[in-house]
Amino acid sequence: MSDEQQQEESEVKVVEAVQTLDELLQDEDAMWTKVSQPQLEEHLDQHDRYVKGILGAKRASLKFLDMSYLDFSGRNLTQADCTGARCEHATMEDANLMASNFYAADMRFVSLIGADLTRADLRGGVSARGRLLQRQFGRG
């Protein structure tokens, strides 16, 4: 195969990849997996075991999950990874979110009343009109 043919083939693959990416981005739900409240509870129960130091327990990896409208109230998400998650309209009142990662997460209309956000990573996320009243940032 000549260099010119290889270059043309490479260009075709790039164009196909860009078209596929465009299709994925047009379908909002293609990048997130919807989680039900019982499924979330399973993840958080396992995470509670992790936080308590129980052997074999796993830290919650909730990356790119759609957890919109779910209830996290009073739960411990210390060090949980929620990178890129959809959490619109979720209730996180009195939740422990210490050192959790919500990088690039959609936090629109999330109620965080009484939540502990000490060292939580909220960079790059969307939080328009989120209720951040009475946040507790820890004492330091």
Image (spheres, rainbow, N blue to C red):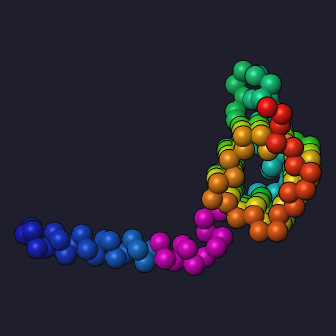
Q: Tell me the residue at 43%/78% (across/down).
A: 19
Going by the image, does 49 lie left or right of 9?
right
The N terminus: image quadrant: bottom left
Which residue is most to the left?
2
Q: Which residues are magenta?
A: 21-33
Q: Tell me the residue at 28%/76% (across/down).
A: 12
In magenta stretch: residue 30: yes
- Residue nearest the observer in this picture, 70 or 138: 138
The C terminus: image quadrant: top right
Going by the image, does 120 lie left or right of 94?
left
**Relative image position of residue 14 (x, y in whole percent):** 32, 71
- Residue nearest the observer in this picture, 85 or 45: 85
Going by the image, does 22 lie left or right of 73?
left
Whether residue 37 is situated above or below residue 100 in the rendered picture? below
Q: Tell me the residue at 61%/76% (across/down).
A: 27
> Main SS of the magenta segment?
helix
Which of the 4 image quarters holds residue 97? top right
Q: Tell me the residue at 92%/51% (across/down).
A: 134
Tell me if residue 37 can be seen: yes
